[in-house]
């Protein structure tokens, strides 16, 4: 309920006669001047006072340590310095600091005298600083054997102790706890929860796109895409199809039913946390199978963000037509996707997982200037599986076969059955044996001729050993020597991580085994390198493969990323060497990715280049995007392929109207070919108040949406009565971010593109209301959001 607040404010003012400023001082005339006691002894002013940042081995521990400049360097406030590093040393008598360091029998006694007045820089003569005697950097080095340096460009004092301080150990523990806590996001406890229970059937929302394309050397092409999402049989149903000149409607029809426990509780007689039926995607396994998609089902009580195999994973999600996706890890731009796969998803394969917390961001960019961010969290390690906890998953999938239409069989150049085809049943069960040891058993059975070789099993152990994680996996298909995979990952200080992996494939024949590979060894180092007072995350990945026929391959990849102001860039450099009895090849290739917002523009560029066998650029491309107003969007693209000596340019314009969206594209190439296209799109949903279908801009089916209704509730019955009014122009904070959508004249708004899977906080921004005395009945709500 919005209530009019009537407040009566009483003000009392005390007047004092100001001191008369000097006539020749313009600042004194404007602001007055402080009264000075000419008879008092002068003390140190604040002109040479510095507030420096204290950094402990690259970790910020204090933002403002009072510091004075003297002729020999810096002089720090002792109490602030010892308190920031949590060293139990204090001033027991004037100028005398005593305590202990690391151990109580390791006593510290420091006698300080105030620096000489002649050592000060641009200050009046004084015997001590305002905080008393100060602590020079040399004194710190002498008593604590610290490496301590001052960087004047960033006003940072960097401390590097010879051993780990108790403060560092505590911060590491807190960071680990915070990362685990981040995995258990819950609704804001102060906000009432608006539940969103699954229904037997509900009105779906839909997105429709129609493309018309023309080219210089081809006939007119049409493309129709349709996506719908809604509740069906108490699940979230998603239906998608794409048809055109070369694709029939039935071949691309996909239907998936999912049910997920938002609160994390286990549901049903099997105590599952999530269920997926229909056209699904099954992630790959390190030794047993590669990822596959097709018709089937998955039942599991494993939390959605859990992972306990230290290798790689894949990140996928719905990618509407005309959108592109970028993948970031801790702010590093890793890769981008501009076209959906056959299932309509963006797909990032072989994404590396590290022990502890893994945080990835997928940033989606739409053709009309829309932006979305999806956060993917994976915690790798046994810490999330307590002792005696049992987790399981069951899956059955018919690879490359789907519910509707003819089977879509992807064939290779040799016209053979693809590796991911055929029916496979998979089961996994894991249990926490102790607080530091987890056991796991995997089994799968190939149920058709195309998948017979997929029948195999694996036994695994995962352990935490101090700051290290280790895993051992043994897999066999009953056809000879088993496969063995061992992994060891260990942190080297707070800013580095070393990972090693050795895989012996033996006689294993499953699709997870790379073709022609007998043995694989990997070494990876993740570290942060300081450069000009800025951290540069870097990764070095070394992979060696023993190939069939006495051949081997070595790949060494270094990726370094950085951020300068709002720019983010990544440079990847790869050295490859192939050795065989009659062949030897060497190559060095590089790729640079750059993404930067520039005023109203977003610029993205990519450069591919070769260093060996000869130095040359491979290709270069750039994309410049700009938003016009709130609903218009333009983009220009340039690309050049140096090897083919081919250039291309394209441009697009789009705008979102109240009921639909419109986009136009055009492109030319150096071979005088051209393309042109026109796209119209719209969404279909049911109006919250009238219950009638309505047209909206597309984009509701791939994510969640809310439809708030704001009105003045004078009588407090929670209903809009005839003598009450709806509020126009109200805006909202969703997940602590201000949304651009505002309520229309009927008091309603549609806020789409919301991340699903966890409750979101929604608050009405009071400053957006037309009457400052109107206040929300509730400070905010927590809303369970699901697709559709």
Image: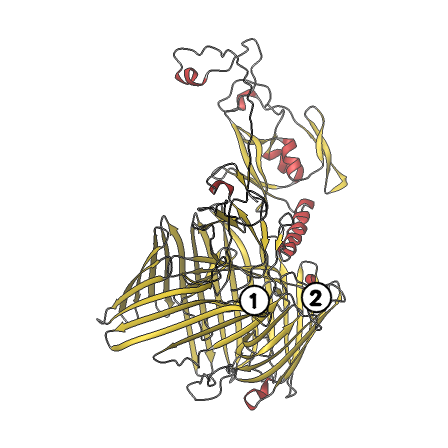
Q: Residue farthest to the left? A: 672
Residue 296 drawn at (x, y percent): 57, 79
Q: Is residue 376 above or below residue 3?
A: below
Q: Residue sitting at 51 percent across and 26 percent down? A: 48
Q: Residue sitting at 45 percent across and 18 percent down? A: 31
N-term mark: 2 or 1: 2
Q: Is residue 398 above or below residue 315?
A: below
Picture quadrant where residue 507 is located? bottom right
Q: 681 and 428: which one is in front?
A: 681
Q: 169 and 399: which one is in front?
A: 399
State which mark lies toward you, 2 or 1.
Answer: 2
Q: Is residue 67 above or below residue 330?
A: above
Q: Residue sitting at 40 percent across and 14 percent down? A: 25
Residue 616 drawn at (x, y percent): 33, 66
User: Looking at the rendering, in which quadrant would you find the N terminus?
Assistant: top right
Residue 146 drawn at (x, y percent): 62, 41
Q: Is residue 630 left or right of residue 144?
A: left
| Visible residue check, residue 113 | yes
Q: Residue farthest to the right? A: 105
| Visible residue check, residue 346 | no
Q: Residue farthest to the front? A: 722
Q: Is residue 281 above or below residue 43?
A: below
Secondary structure of residue under mark 2: strand
Q: Residue sitting at 54 percent across and 45 percent down? A: 713
Circle 2 residues within 10 Å: few <14, some 14–19, many ≥20 = many
Say which residue label 1 marks.
523
**Label drawn at residue 762:** none
Picture quadrant where residue 674 is located? bottom left
Say which residue label 2 marks.
463
């Amino acid at each position: 309920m919005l209530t009019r607040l009537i407040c009566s404010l009483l003000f009392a003012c005390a007047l004092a006669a100001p001191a008369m400023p000097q006539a020749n001082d313009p600042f004194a005339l404007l602001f007055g001047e402080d009264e000075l006691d000419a008879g008092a002894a002068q003390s140190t002013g604040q002109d040479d006072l510095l507030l420096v940042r204290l950094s402990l081995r690259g970790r910020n521990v204090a933002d403002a340590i009072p510091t004075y400049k003297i002729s020999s360097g810096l002089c720090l406030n002792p109490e602030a310095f010892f308190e920031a590093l949590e060293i139990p040393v204090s001033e027991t008598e004037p100028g005398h600091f005593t305590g202990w360091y690391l151990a109580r029998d390791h006593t510290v006694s420091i006698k300080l005298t105030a620096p000489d007045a002649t050592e000060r820089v641009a200050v009046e003569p004084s015997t001590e600083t305002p905080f008393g005697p100060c602590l020079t950097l040399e004194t710190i080095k002498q008593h604590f054997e610290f490496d301590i340096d001052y960087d004047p460009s960033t006003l940072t004092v960097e401390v590097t102790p010879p051993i780990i301080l108790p403060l560092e150990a505590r911060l590491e523990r807190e960071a680990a706890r915070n990362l685990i806590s981040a995995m258990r996001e819950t609704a804001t406890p102060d906000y009432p929860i608006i539940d969103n229970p699954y229904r037997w059937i509900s009105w779906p929302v839909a997105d429709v796109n129609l493309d018309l394309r023309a080219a210089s050397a081809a006939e007119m092409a049409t493309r129709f895409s349709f996506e719908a999402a809604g509740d069906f049989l108490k699940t979230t149903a998603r239906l998608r199809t794409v048809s055109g000149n070369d694709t029939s409607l039935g071949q691309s029809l996909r239907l998936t039913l999912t049910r997920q426990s938002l609160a994390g509780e286990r549901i049903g007689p099997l105590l599952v946390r999530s269920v997926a039926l229909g056209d699904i995607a099954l992630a790959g396994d390190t030794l047993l199978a590669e990822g596959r998609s097709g018709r089937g089902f998955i039942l599991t009580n494993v939390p959605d963000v859990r992972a306990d195999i230290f290798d790689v994973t894949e990140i996928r999600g719905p990618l509407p037509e005309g959108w592109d996706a970028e993948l970031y890890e801790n702010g590093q731009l890793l890769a981008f996707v501009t076209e959906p796969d056959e299932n309509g998803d963006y797909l990032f394969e072989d994404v590396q997982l590290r022990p502890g917390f893994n945080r990835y961001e997928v940033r989606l960019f739409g053709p009309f200037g829309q932006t979305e961010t999806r956060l993917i969290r994976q915690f790798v390690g046994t810490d999330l599986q307590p002792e005696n906890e049992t987790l399981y998953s069951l899956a059955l999938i018919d690879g490359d076969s789907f519910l509707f239409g003819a089977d879509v069989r992807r064939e290779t150049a040799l016209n053979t059955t693809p590796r991911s085809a055929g029916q496979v049943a998979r089961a996994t069960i894991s249990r926490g044996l102790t607080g530091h040891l987890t056991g796991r058993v995997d089994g799968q059975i190939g149920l058709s001729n195309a998948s017979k070789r997929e029948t195999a099993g694996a036994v695994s152990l995962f352990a935490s050993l101090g700051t290290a994680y280790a895993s051992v996996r043994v897999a066999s298909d009953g056809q000879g020597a088993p496969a063995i995979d061992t992994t060891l990952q260990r942190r080297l200080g707070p800013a580095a991580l070393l990972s090693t992996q050795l895989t012996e494939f033996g006689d294993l024949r499953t699709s997870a085994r790379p073709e022609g590979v007998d043995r694989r060894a990997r070494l990876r180092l993740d570290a942060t390198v300081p450069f000009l007072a800025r951290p540069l995350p870097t990764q070095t990945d070394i992979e060696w493969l023993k190939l069939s026929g006495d051949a081997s391959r070595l790949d060494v990849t270094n990726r370094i990323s950085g951020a300068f102001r709002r720019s983010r860039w990544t440079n990847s450099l790869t050295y490859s060497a192939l050795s065989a009895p009659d062949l030897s090849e060497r190559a060095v290739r590089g790729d640079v990715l750059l993404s930067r917002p520039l005023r109203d523009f977003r610029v993205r560029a990519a450069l591919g280049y070769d260093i060996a066998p000869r130095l040359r650029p491979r290709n270069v491309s750039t994309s410049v995007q700009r938003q016009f107003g709130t609903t218009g969007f333009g983009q220009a693209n340039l690309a050049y392929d140096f090897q083919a000596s081919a250039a291309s340019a394209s441009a697009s314009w789009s705008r979102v109207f109240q009921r639909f969206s419109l986009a136009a594209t055009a492109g030319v190439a150096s071979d005088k070919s051209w393309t042109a296209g026109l796209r119209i799109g719209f969404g279909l949903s049911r109006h919250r108040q009238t219950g009638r279908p309505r047209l909206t801009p597309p984009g509701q089916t791939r994510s969640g949406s809310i439809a708030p209704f704001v009105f003045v509730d004078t009588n407090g019955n929670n209903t809009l009565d005839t003598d009450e009014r709806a509020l126009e122009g109200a805006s909202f904070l969703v997940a602590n971010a201000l949304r651009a959508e505002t309520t229309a004249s009927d008091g309603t708004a549609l806020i789409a593109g919301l991340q699903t899977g966890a409750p979101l906080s929604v608050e009405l921004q009071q400053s957006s209301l037309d009457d400052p005395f109107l206040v929300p009945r509730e400070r905010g709500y927590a809303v369970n959001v699901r697709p559709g």
